[in-house]
Amino acid sequence: MSSQPFIVKPGDNITLSNVEQDCKPERIPDYTGTFQKKGETKKPLKKLNKRLLKLQELLYAESKHALLIILQGMDTCGKDGTIRKVMAGINVQGCEVVNFKVPSSDEIARDFLWRAHKAVPKKGMIGIFNRSHYEDVLVVRVHDLVDESVWKKRYQQINDFEKMLVENGTVVLKFFLHISKDEQKERLESRINDPTKHWKITEADIRERSYWDDYMQAYESVLQKCTTQWAPWYIIPANRKWYRNIVITERIVETLEKLDMNYPKPNSDVSTLYVD
């Protein structure tokens, strides 16, 4: 497998309006095969989920690495759905999800990376950031919450932070879930029209949509300035949830397989043990 069609390489000039948001197999060379619709991915995704479970067990047993998965994207892009579908069947004891909402007064009183650093998974664990430290160069920028001279320095600070994590055994996978403005409109309307989803939408969600173009510019800067050899960004076409799920699951499985993990050797000869 090769994930190159989705990767942002250092030096790439990203214009998100020109980047695919739908599943277009003819434009994506042999990464997810030639899947055209949801039903065709059910069996492959189930197989990948089983493989992911085995790899998670190896990660936990060996405890030499941690895996940090960062999910970013506009409202309704599918961060929660990705976590639910991609991580289906894994051992919850080895995985922790952290949601990054409006920072508390305690968090604001510290450097912007503090709350992210303390949430990084320990070795043997998978950690998932639903939003992340990147909010401090996204929301902060769009809404002028700090001076430009402050948030501009944060790109390099983030790169240095992630490099430190990688050098100390944490694998960092960053996924930008790329949906269109029209798709977001449909998803917001579905929440408005379904009483069981009213809890998932607020007036703030509608207001944030008016900043769409500003957010696209902010994300373009993030994708260009913070994709590195040690922690590259992946732009995932996310208008089709089933396609999003299999692409991300493949990438996680591929990444864990490259770690060439092994079960640790026992401290004694297990063959001599006897159970009465």
Image (cartoon, rainbow, N blue to C red):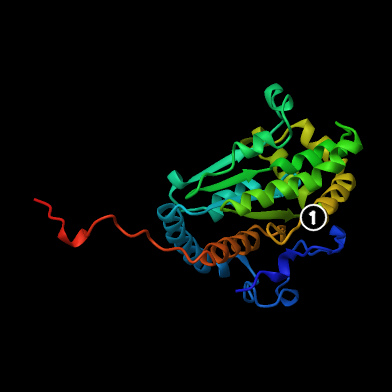
The type of residue carrying mark 1 is Leu
In the picture provided, is 259 more to the left or to the right than 272?
right
* Residue 78 seen in the current view: no
- Image height of 47 relative to 106, above or below: below
Q: In which quarter of the image is the N terminus?
A: bottom right
How many residues crowd mark 1 within 10 Å: few (<14), some (14–19), many (20+)? many
Name the residue furthest top.
105
Residue 250 is situated, as x and y percent measured from the top left of the image, at 58, 65
Residue 217 is situated, as x and y percent measured from the top left of the image, at 88, 50
Q: In which quarter of the image is residue 106?
A: top right
* Residue 271 seen in the current view: yes
Q: Which residue corresponds to the image point at 84% horizontal and 42% vertical from the top-left?
A: 153
- Image height of 198 relative to 252, above or below: above
On the image, numbered disc 1 is attached to which residue?
A: 223
- Image height of 153 relative to 228, above or below: above
Determine the secondary structure under disc 1.
helix
Q: Which residue corresponds to the image point at 84% horizontal and 54% vertical from the top-left?
A: 220
Q: In which quarter of the image is residue 140?
A: top right
Front-lying residue, 101 or 147: 147
Q: Which residue corresponds to the image point at 72% horizontal and 30% vertical from the top-left?
A: 102
- Image height of 63 relative to 131, above or below: below
